[in-house]
Image (cartoon, coloured by chain):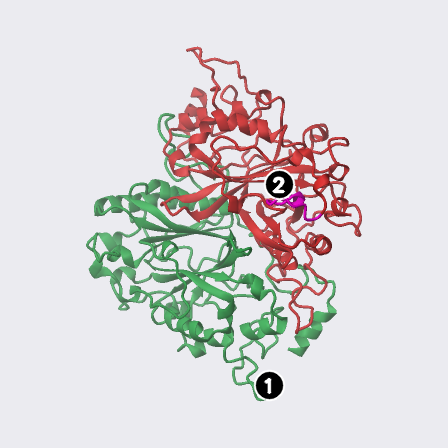
Chain colours: A red, B green
Amino acid sequence: MAGVAAAGAGALALTHGQATPGTVATELVSDAGGAIPFYGARQAGIVTPAQDRLHFCAFDVITDDKAALVDMLQDWTAAAARMTQGRDAGTFGAVGGSLEAPPDDTGEALGLPASGLTLTIGFGPTLFRNAQGKDRFGIAAKRPAALADLPKFPRDALEDAISGGDIGVQACAHDPQVAVHAIRNLARIGMGKVSVRWSQLGFGRTSSTSTSQATPRNLFGFKDGTRNLKAEEPQLLDEHLWVQQGDGPEWMTGGSYLVTRKIRMLVETWDRSPLAEQQTIIGRDKSEGAPLTGKQEHDEPDFAAQDGEGQPVIPMDSHLRLAHPDQNGGARLLRRGYNFVDGSDGLGRLNAGLFFMAYQRNPHKQFVPVQNNLAKMDALNEYIRHVSSAMFACPPGLLAADDYWGRSLFA
Amino acid sequence: MAGVAAAGAGALALTHGQATPGTVATELVSDAGGAIPFYGARQAGIVTPAQDRLHFCAFDVITDDKAALVDMLQDWTAAAARMTQGRDAGTFGAVGGSLEAPPDDTGEALGLPASGLTLTIGFGPTLFRNAQGKDRFGIAAKRPAALADLPKFPRDALEDAISGGDIGVQACAHDPQVAVHAIRNLARIGMGKVSVRWSQLGFGRTSSTSTSQATPRNLFGFKDGTRNLKAEEPQLLDEHLWVQQGDGPEWMTGGSYLVTRKIRMLVETWDRSPLAEQQTIIGRDKSEGAPLTGKQEHDEPDFAAQDGEGQPVIPMDSHLRLAHPDQNGGARLLRRGYNFVDGSDGLGRLNAGLFFMAYQRNPHKQFVPVQNNLAKMDALNEYIRHVSSAMFACPPGLLAADDYWGRSLFA
């Protein structure tokens, strides 16, 4: 640690651009205009290199008519296939239809390229059986065991209005206008069948999902998700990310489960903490993101290492230790979170934090044990608050243009 | 109009990229890493070509100690001068200080370039005399007449908690993480002297402030701000934007007044309106943004033109007509607004709209008559709601490194 501090102290003329070689810069993605294929064995937007911007939306299904819901899912699929390729949401677009009819695209993305847009759909527990216990669509028997409700974790401060949801759609893109446009058009198409339960914008990604991406920083100023699962690790993805045959109902084989948690960060309190305290709470140094026992970001942490006084160099209650697979039966996640600022909190502070999203093969074997561990002991808990929670079963991708979101569940 | 519709109807395979030649695409600004000079006769961030992303913050001053406030403004100025050049907020940066002290930068912008960051400060009416009528800092006599409170407009639905503010800071950048970082560090530096009253993220600019920029689209899907004042029109800027000698107190000469209005858009209702209705409400066609009497975006509207039935082609209650300088004694504005989506509204809809910002020489001669006109008659009123309002006197720029924000007001 002394080395890190000394190196830093010498660099008085730090600039954002020079402080940490290898840190991610604003990525002028070479194919920012490029479209990501919509059809494929997997849904796009999971191992796709994490785009810079997010608009996530959880919908309530407000019809009990299965045929109407299926119709909408077919319409959504057609619109998603178009929009992800940089096209308008519907055949006639924003300006090409009848003057006497509402346009079939809202128009704010006219002139914008596809911008790497991906749309990823998932189905929440309440779609299978709603809050009143009703199986509205005759699919309760298809609910995977892995989609059982999450337990209540210690310190949870969840707000119902921004938790849960029957259907979740993740829109990621390099241009936020494109992500917003996509969600807004799905909401438009779904009018009368779904309503927006909650929606969340994320302005900056906090995770990398590809070895081609540098590790970004969260609003604590630390690199986040260093040990994230990566697209280039197919064996690990089969083990930890993708639902395998025999895991549960066949319609989810090749899919993945998404857990979202809106984590408010009390940044004002954090900002008053000394650098050493921040680093021991995280278990990494702030500059490089190296474990306190190492020098480089990707050095393996040495949890057995002790300081001169016989204390662990990486504290027992540090975030790094508690979240590490070694402390959680080997559990790993594919994280895809985003920084958010939702104005102020009415108490003179920014309403800021991390919109955590993690894909996994089985939340009850992965997210749940890790979060139990963190919620009980993490030194970071003093600075964070989980205010929303949701879970969605995201089926595999669509292979043919006549397939549609949810067919394997509803047909 | 018939021509527009016919041309549109033939283009079945519209893509975002092809629909409207000349429309703005996501601008991969060539100097996205580039720093914009902080010092100059004018504050940056007014006629600076509008950056893509916004974080605006209104602060309450929570100290009555003038010296403490001036100290903070000096610290803010030093931090702003650094951050706009891509440097950390303070001398030792995020990682270069003592381990035993809180860092003097929060760190989330480590590794990011300046990203065109501008920080623009303005002083609100309540800084001169607070809500209790108290002149806390002995500056009430320096309050410009132009900073008199805005009148209440018809249909105003203002929320006090997100209106007003003693000090406003506009952070614009091409990277939202950089804009958020800047505001957050000013809030950190101001701890105990100011608190965050409200803050607003804008994900996409809705105005151009330079002829080098194409006109972007708002969330109604229309091009917005076609007639905006532009940096390349110095005579018009002197007439409409910059405070001139003799206009009021000398400390504002060379500055400008900012009016902000958060305008919620009822996009779900709008999206159900026929294209023809949308176009007559706006007074322009949706594809090109041309006035209904013209073909090109920048064609002059012909307000006298009548259709076959003797009705005005550009309706009397259209937004274009009512906001036009000809209807408002020649009043013009430099608009610098941004699209926003703040999650959902709890009623199943997106909480979306336009964060309107306009700079001008005198709000009571410019914004006020225009807004009175619009609030009374604009056909668009059915689809919008003004939910916040604020006004700030933004002094001229700083010319020397020993000058600081507010010196001419407080010294």
Q: Which mark is residue B246?
A: none
Q: Which residues are magenta?
A: A123-137
Per the picture, the main secondary structure of the magenta-coloured stretch is loop
Classify mark 2: residues with Cα within 10 Å, few (<14), some (14-19) or many (20+). many
At 64% from the left and 31% from the top, the residue drawn is A229
Q: Amino acid at mark 2?
A: Ala
Give coordinates of residue A127: x percent, y percent.
65, 45
Residue assigned mark 1: B307
Q: Nearer the viewer, residue A291 or A334?
A: A334
Residue assigned mark 2: A50
At 62% from the left and 71% from the top, the residue drawn is B274
**Left/right of residue B314 with respect to residue A33 in the rendered view:** left
**Is residue A117 visible to the viewer in this orientation of the structure?**
yes
Q: Amino acid at mark 1?
A: Asp
Tell me, yes or no, whether the two marked residues, 2 and 1, touch with CB atoms within 8 Å.
Answer: no
Q: How many marks?
A: 2
Classify mark 1: residues with Cα within 10 Å, few (<14), some (14-19) or many (20+). few
Give coordinates of residue B251: x percent, y percent.
27, 59
Residue A133: in magenta span: yes
Chain letter, disc 1 residue = B
Gap between marks 2 and 1, in whole Å? 52 Å
